[in-house]
Image (spheres, rainbow, N blue to C red):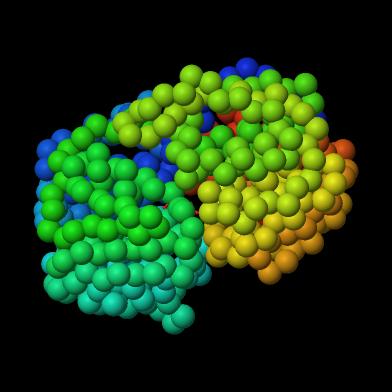
Amino acid sequence: MSQLDFKVTAGGVLKGSLRVPGDKSISHRSIMFGALADGTSHVTGFLQGEDSLNTLRAFRAMGVTIEGPSSDGNVVIHGVGINGLKQPDKALDVGNSGTSMRLMSGLLAGQSFDVVLSGDRSLSKRPMKRVTDPLALMGANVETEDNGRPPLKIKGGSLLKGIHYDMPMASAQVKSCLLLAGMYAQGQTCVTEPAPTRDHTERMLTAFGYPVIRNGDTICIQGGGRLTACDIDVPADISSAAFFIVAASIAKGSDLTLLHVGINPTRTGIIDIMKLMGADIELLNMREVGGEPVADIRIRSRQLKGAEIPESLVPLAIDEFPVIFVAAACAEGKTIISGAEELRVKESDRIQVMADGLQALGVDAQPTEDGMIIQGGLIQGGKVHARDDHRIAMAFTMAALRSQGDIHIEDCVNVNTSFPDFVALANSVGLKVTAEEANF
Ligand code: S3P
């Protein structure tokens, strides 16, 4: 057996500019809607990470012709129309990708054929009842393993009917799953969200000519429509940019610009949280690209201060907490994060794994049921475990900018799920990271 570890040399200053890879959420959706559209869709800036590639492979396996991605992220999708998917020969393995599994479960519940969705060790432990329960209310037939875990066995030919669902948690994946199922349902499907979550599905459905109606916190779709091909320019992923926003804030003397980053207001919690902690962040050259707002983000280092993070910002920065915990460790004073229990069911239990790692580096980080209390101070060098979670690996990489000694991070191979070429890009702006195969 072998694993990939990161060894990060302590210290560093970040200078220059970089464009991080394409947005993961938008990349997944571009394949799904492009595949179901009438006509040919061109995608630029597609994320060539394992997660979005798994979505791409799944649609190929269902008979969709997809060219690319080319080395610079161009993808051409020859849509088969809303009812044009074909039964795949075998189970669709979506690897580590919760977004693929949850969104596709809705879409596949409306097909005429049976299909199985499976995933890797981490995904196989993640909760799927949050999608299978409301899908069952719509009339779908989806079997899970004990406790609602994957694989999902989806029976085709179910007649779906629209429902009005009050979502118990703020989840864009659940919302999107139901809207996708809603395209195949009789009547109207409405989802009410307890707090705003990312709205890429709604925006992209609109771009593909499928009407979506938002009324306050409720989003509705009428079944029986069609999608028309369209071109998608995928901006750089703010969730990948987040590592560098924190990095340039904490590494003294830094001045870094991140190019062409998506700043959809349902994703910019990281900017609000960092500003609350005193960060120096400037949005430049703001523009709109294919229905999504985009900007260049300039960050100059500044001493951060602890803050109590408003719970309303949590869903708007849900993937950014591993690196926000690192920012808190570098801040003066105490940071309190609450209302973030969803972090316990991400690619790892991000509350426990981050608290364990920060404590191993000598930080006073106390996990709570729904968040963490972190007293800023010195970060020691040492060894931490990423538990196969891409965002944990990248967050601890950034911690080395302020650590007293080097940081060795175990189990980093999944960085490839969302951020291909992370090590090279990080080194190009001033980090000192090497990736090493460890055999055991
Ligand atoms: C995503 C939604 C979020 C996020 C995930 C991507 C999406 O999950 O954590 O990385 O693309 O819809 P939840 O909606 O379950 O919070």
Q: How many marks?
A: 0
In the depicted structure, whether residue 202 falls above or below residue 170: above
> Which residue lies at the image location 20% right of the left edge and 54% below the top edge?
62
Give the camera-side residue of 217 and 230.
217
> Which residue lies at the image location 38% right of the left edge and 63% below the top edge?
192
> Which residue lies at the image location 65% right of the left edge and 43% below the top edge?
273
> Which residue lies at the image location 61% right of the left edge and 60% below the top edge?
340
Residue 165: quadrant of the picture: bottom left
* Residue 366 placement (x, y as % from top left): 79, 61
Q: Is residue 120 visible?
A: no
Residue sticking out furthest to the front: 216
In the depicted structure, whether residue 223 falls above or below residue 157: above
* Residue 202 placement (x, y as % from top left): 31, 48
* Residue 139 placement (x, y as % from top left): 22, 77
In the depicted structure, whether residue 432 falls above or below residue 352: above
Q: Quadrant of the C terminus?
A: bottom right
Q: Is residue 186 visible?
A: yes
Q: Quadrant of the N terminus?
A: bottom right
Indicate left or right for 29 with 351 as reference: left
Residue 135: quadrant of the picture: bottom left
Residue 6: quadrant of the picture: top right
* Residue 264 placement (x, y as % from top left): 45, 38
Give the camera-side residue of 154 and 434.
154
Give the camera-side residue of 316 and 110.
316
